[in-house]
Every structure is written in structure tokens, then in C-alpha cells.
Image (spheres, helix red, strand yellow):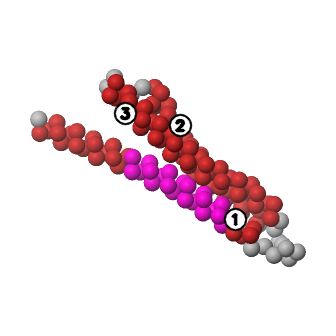
Amino acid sequence: MEYYRAVVDAHHQNFRSVIDYGLTAVKAAMLINGGAAIAILAFLGNLKPGAPLSIPPTSLAFPLLSFSAGVLLGALGTMFGYFTQYKFTYDFVRTGQASIVGILLHLTAVLFVVIAFGCFAYGIWQSYQAIF
């Protein structure tokens, strides 16, 4: 019986660490994308009207859009993470096992966060292309 409790406790701790890593990934995706979007907006806000520019301000539109999309996708990842936990909890209470809907919700949440990091990488690349 003691062995069973130790195994269940180990699985519970592993599950908590997976959730913590997921939350950290979502927060990081939203933070880096949001920070980059704010940096571009601050740069554009400090441009002097009529001053000669080495880069046109419109060239930063795509990077800004990419970073903003990354923030949105991070938020959607959080929302789908909530839906996943709700569905898994409901399924385990009702049937004792996960449903395909819960698994699909989980994969969707992970996909949104991965794409959010991709938006950051794409936004950096587009910013580099705009400047150089």
C-alpha cells in the first residue's frame, strides 16, 4: 500500500511540474511578443515628424502584426488550456478516462503556444529585414 501511495505521489508531482512548465511557456510567449510589440510602438511613437528616416515606419507593420498575433495566440493557448482541464476533469469524474475531445483541446492549446513562439521568431526576422 505504501508503494502505491509513493507511485501516485510521484505521478502527481510530475503532473504538477508539467502544468507549471506549460504555464511558464504561455507566460514567456506572451511576454516576449508583448514586449516586442510595445518596443516597436515606442519606437514609432518617438519618431519626429518630417525628420529624415533611414527606414520607413510602414516597414515595421508586419513585425508589429506578428508580435501582436503572438500575444493573441498565447491568450488563446491559455483559454484552450482551461477548456482542456475542464474537459479532462469532467471526463475523469464521469468515465474515469480522457476523451478524444480533451486530447484535441490539449493539442490545440500546445499548438497555439508553439505558433506564438513562431510569431516571435518571424517578427524578429521581419524587423531585421526592415532595418538592414
What secondary structure is marked by label 3?
helix
Q: Which is nearer the eye, 94 or 53? A: 94
Q: Is residue 86 above or below residue 94?
A: below
Locate the C terminus by quadrant.
bottom right
- Label for residue 40? 1
Mark 1 and mark 3: Cα distance apart in space? 41 Å
Is 49 displayed left or right of 85 in the figure?
right
Which residue is drawn at the image coordinates 34% and 29% (left, top)? 92
For label 2, the residue is 108
Of the two numbered discs 1 and 3 in the rendering, the one whose residue sits closer to the viewer: 3
Residue type, numbered disc 3:
Thr
Q: Is residue 122 visible?
A: no
Q: Is residue 41 above or below residue 115?
A: below
For label 3, the residue is 89
Q: Residues within 10 Å of mark 2 (few under 14, many from 20)?
A: some
Q: Is residue 19 visible?
A: yes
Of the two numbered discs 2 and 3 in the rendering, the one whose residue sits closer to the viewer: 3
Give yes or no for residue 29 being in the magenta stretch.
Answer: yes
Which residue is drawn at the image coordinates 41% and 51% (left, top)? 21
| The quarter of the displayed image where residue 120 is located | bottom right
All told, the count of numbered labels is 3
Part of the protein shown in magenta: 19-41
